[in-house]
């Protein structure tokens, strides 16, 4: 499996400072972590979650003095990897880089899931927010969101959009777009945003809301046309691309947040230490810059605030999808 390895931390501090660090992180002295830590990512290499995990994993490896192994377990809109992490031993050696997609959006529309993200995980720390771009293939004769809406209304069922899987952010964001605009674009699910983007670039698909990391290189190369961004604010990487709310769908807002989770039952001291180390990583300028280059924004919050946010966001998506009549099997 792919792994992330960085140089061991050098002893750049004075002996007294090192002593204080040990006192501040007692579990390091007690033996945790004593072996590599597996970070499960429920989506393929190259997508928004994977890219965020590798930036975080490199720096946690350095701070914890143990290798963070990135393990991509894909499929079922993120459900396969999420279930695997939920069933792992709660010992601190398996963590999940989860996202809005499989933690709050999929459970809002799916029935019969074998896990409950609100019950089976501890929300350790929010890490970053990843924008999505509404993009189209250049062959589609549209230059704006209003053009796309007009064409889709004129040709219901003729425009296909790809997603990272049923119930994923890229699925539900487009299903919400269809609902709010009265359009009927057709859903084609994939195992991850990278594959969906590849087929969109190749012309097999005509539209999609894909993550900024997956879409940005193709937008810059002129192989995809960016019509709007799904977040409340424009991205400094694409300052001329409007938000969907600005572009003709008032009130539209979708953000693919990411965060670290551990299986319920993980010792509180392990959770607390992991939270502190993630916060320290996200305070580093180079980590924030690396995320920004992907189009992501570092956005840390700890256990208490992140737990409250996840529960509120889940409730919001349950309400949104019910009001819009969005189902998991919706095309």
Image (spheres, helix red, strand yellow):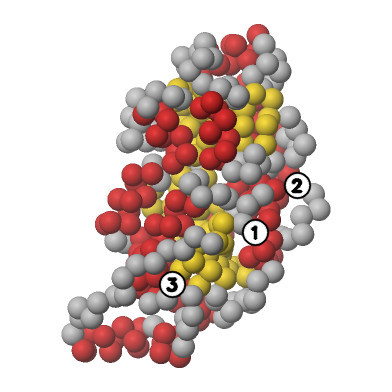
- On screen, 199 above or below 73? above
Q: Tell me what residue is drawn at x 28 percent, y 56 percent.
A: 286
Q: Closer to the observer: label 2 or label 3?
A: 3
Residue at 48% across, 46% down: 46
Q: Position of residue 52 (x, y in %)?
A: 44, 53
Query: Which class describes the residues within 10 Å of circle 2: few (<14), some (14-19), or many (20+)?
Result: few
| Residue situated in front as seen by the camera: 131 or 42 | 42
Residue 276, picture quadrant? bottom left
Mark 1 vs 2, N-terminal side: 1
In the image shown, does 196 or 60 lie closer to the viewer? Answer: 196
Q: Nearer the viewer, mark 3 or mark 1?
A: 3
Locate residue 213 relative to residue 99 in the image: left or right: left
Determine whether label 2 and label 3 are within 8 Å by CB.
Answer: no
Could you say which disc has been placed on residue 110 in the image? 2
Element at label 3: loop
Q: Residue furthest front?
A: 1
**Cα distance, mark 1 to mark 2?**
14 Å
In the rendered view, would you say 198 is above or below 153? Answer: below
At a point 23% along the width and 84% down the height, the residue shown is 17
Label 3 – label 1 distance at C-alpha: 21 Å
Q: Which residue is mark 3?
A: 67
* Nearer-N-terminus badge (3/1): 3
Residue situated furthest right in the rendering = 112
| Percent x, y of residue 34 | 47, 84
Q: Nearer the viewer, mark 1 or mark 2?
A: 1
**Do we see residue 307 in this rendering?**
no
Figure quadrant of residue 189: top right
Instruction: Count every numbered label the image shows and give the total.
Output: 3
Whether residue 38 is visible, yes or no, is yes
The residue at which mark 1 appears reads as: 82
Q: Quadrant of the C terminus?
A: top right
């Amino acid at each position: 499996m792919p792994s992330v390895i960085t140089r061991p931390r050098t002893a750049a501090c004075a002996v007294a400072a090192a002593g204080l660090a040990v006192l501040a992180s007692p579990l390091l002295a007690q033996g945790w972590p004593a072996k590599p830590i597996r970070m499960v990512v429920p989506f393929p290499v190259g997508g928004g979650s994977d890219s965020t995990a590798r930036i975080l994993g490199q720096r946690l490896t350095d701070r914890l003095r143990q290798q963070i192994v990135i393990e991509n377990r894909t499929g079922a809109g993120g459900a396969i990897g999420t279930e695997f992490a939920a069933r792992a031993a709660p010992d601190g050696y398996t963590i999940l880089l989860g996202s809005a997609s499989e933690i709050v959006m999929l459970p809002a529309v799916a029935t019969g899931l074998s896990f409950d993200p609100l019950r089976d995980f501890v929300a350790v720390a929010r890490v970053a927010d990843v924008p999505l771009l509404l993009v189209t293939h250049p062959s589609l004769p549209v230059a704006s969101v209003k053009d796309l809406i007009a064409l889709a209304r004129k040709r219901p069922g003729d425009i296909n959009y790809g997603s990272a899987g049923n119930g994923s952010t890229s699925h539900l964001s487009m299903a919400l777009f269809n609902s709010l605009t009265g359009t009927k674009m057709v859903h084609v699910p994939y195992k991850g945003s990278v594959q969906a983007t590849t087929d969109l670039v190749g012309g097999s698909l005509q539209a999609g809301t894909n993550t900024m990391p997956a879409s940005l290189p193709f937008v810059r190369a002129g192989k995809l046309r960016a019509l709007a961004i799904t977040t409340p604010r424009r991205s400094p990487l694409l300052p001329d691309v409007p938000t969907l709310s600005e572009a003709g769908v008032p009130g539209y807002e979708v953000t693919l947040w990411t965060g670290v989770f551990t299986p319920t039952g993980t010792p509180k001291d392990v959770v607390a230490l992991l939270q502190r180390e993630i916060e320290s990583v996200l305070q580093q300028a180079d980590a924030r810059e690396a995320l920004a280059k992907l189009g992501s924004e570092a956005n840390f919050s700890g256990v208490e605030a992140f737990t409250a946010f996840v529960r509120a966001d889940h409730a919001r998506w349950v309400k949104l999808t019910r009001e819009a009549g969005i189902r998991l099997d919706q095309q």
